Amino acid sequence: MNAKLDDEMVLMNIETSEYFGMNPTCSKIWEILEINMSVDQLIHRLLDIYEVDYETCQKDVTPVIQDMIERKFLISL
């Protein structure tokens, strides 16, 4: 379950009642992930949106994805 307010989003795991608050960048990642893709494809999409180099984007995105998987908001990528 998710809810969006302006550029931010909150996810709720219905099984655990755990909330996951997302800033605008995490919200954009979630929005992009609605289309099934690999982490590399996600990073390339983000490079089109944000002024960041590949290595920095990968370093920043990887822990977010891992956290979403650990909290069971994502199954895997």
Image (tube, rainbow, N blue to C red):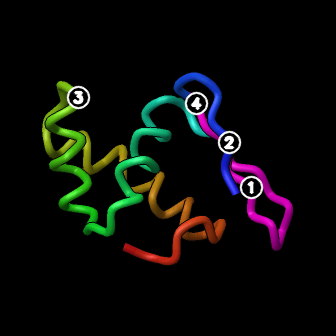
Q: Earlier in the sequence, mark 3 or mark 1?
A: 1
Residue in the foreground of this view, choosing between 22 and 33? 33
Q: Name the residue under label 3.
A: 50
Q: How far apart are marks 4 and 1 (CA)?
A: 14 Å
What kind of residue is marked 4? Answer: Glu
Q: Which residue is drawn at 80% across and 66% down?
A: 14
Q: How far apart are marks 3 and 4 (CA)?
A: 17 Å
Q: Is residue 17 magenta?
A: yes
Q: Which residue is drawn at 51% across and 77% down?
A: 75
Q: Mark 1 points at which residue?
A: 12
What kind of residue is marked 3? Answer: Tyr
Q: Name the residue under label 4.
A: 8
Q: Earlier in the sequence, mark 3 or mark 4?
A: 4
Q: Where is residue 31 in the image (x, y as percent from the top left)?
A: 42, 47
Secondary structure under the numbered disc 1 in the rendered image: strand
Secondary structure under the numbered disc 3 in the rendered image: loop
Q: Which residue is drawn at 59% across and 38% down?
A: 22
Answer yes or no: do the residues labelled 3 and 2 have beta carbons within 8 Å?
no
Q: Say whether residue 62 is left or right of residue 68.
A: left
Q: Distance between the residues labelled 3 and 1?
A: 27 Å
Q: Where is residue 64 in the image (x, y as percent from the top left)?
A: 47, 52
Specify the segment rendered in magenta.
8-21
